[in-house]
Image (cartoon, rainbow, N blue to C red):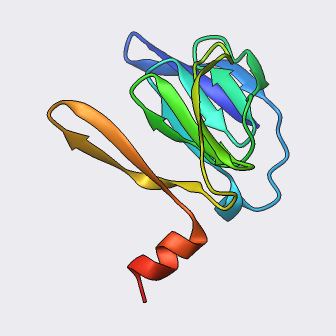
Amino acid sequence: MRPGYSLTGGRASESWSVKVEIVNIMETYIVFWDNDTIVADDQLYDVATGDHRSVPWKGAVVIVNDLALSCESGSCSAWRKDGSRAWSVDATEEANVSEGVIVRSGKHYVVAVGEADRDRAHP
């Protein structure tokens, strides 16, 4: 069960709940996307209503500003909350997004690397 709570008059009350099956909590992916959306595994949840829908990507993502970045099958893409693709670039088959975000001059960057790149960087 994944509940959503609201604070009114200094008290928490349950606003909504969604029943989900968690096989292994250590492998469950949960991240906040701005103040209004929760990414939980392959679902997007509206924090105000509990409404949810499937994510348009496969695998893990990194949230940077208002985009979700993912890599799969030889390309890396940025996704908007409405499920549309903002952009996509070709990448190696094994490319994946890193969990760290680099901020430089007010711009946010994510590094996408493949296994071969990782092996060269950390012999």
Which residue appears at 75% of the width and 20% of the height? 52
Let me know if residue 78 appears in the view. Answer: no
Q: In this view, does 71 lie to the left or right of 73?
A: left
Which residue appears at 48% of the width and 36% of the height? 63
User: Which quadrant of the figure contains the N terminus?
Assistant: top right
Q: Is residue 101 left or right of residue 93?
A: left
Residue 61 versus residue 77: which sits nearer the camera? 77
Which residue appears at 18% of the width and 30% of the height? 106
Task: Looking at this view, name the residue that lies furthest to the bottom.
Answer: 123
Q: In this view, does 58 lie above or below 55?
A: below
Q: How many marks overall?
A: 0
Residue 122 versus residue 9: which sits nearer the camera? 122
Q: Is residue 123 left or right of residue 75?
A: left
Q: Position of residue 55 (x, y in %)?
A: 73, 29
Let me know if residue 113 appears in the view. Answer: yes
Q: Position of residue 123 (x, y in %)?
A: 43, 89
Which residue appears at 66% of the width and 11% of the height? 49
Q: In which quarter of the image is residue 13?
A: top right
Q: In this view, does 95 lie above or below 69?
A: below
Q: In this view, does 32 lie to the left or right of 24?
A: left
Q: In this view, does 113 lie above or below 30?
A: below
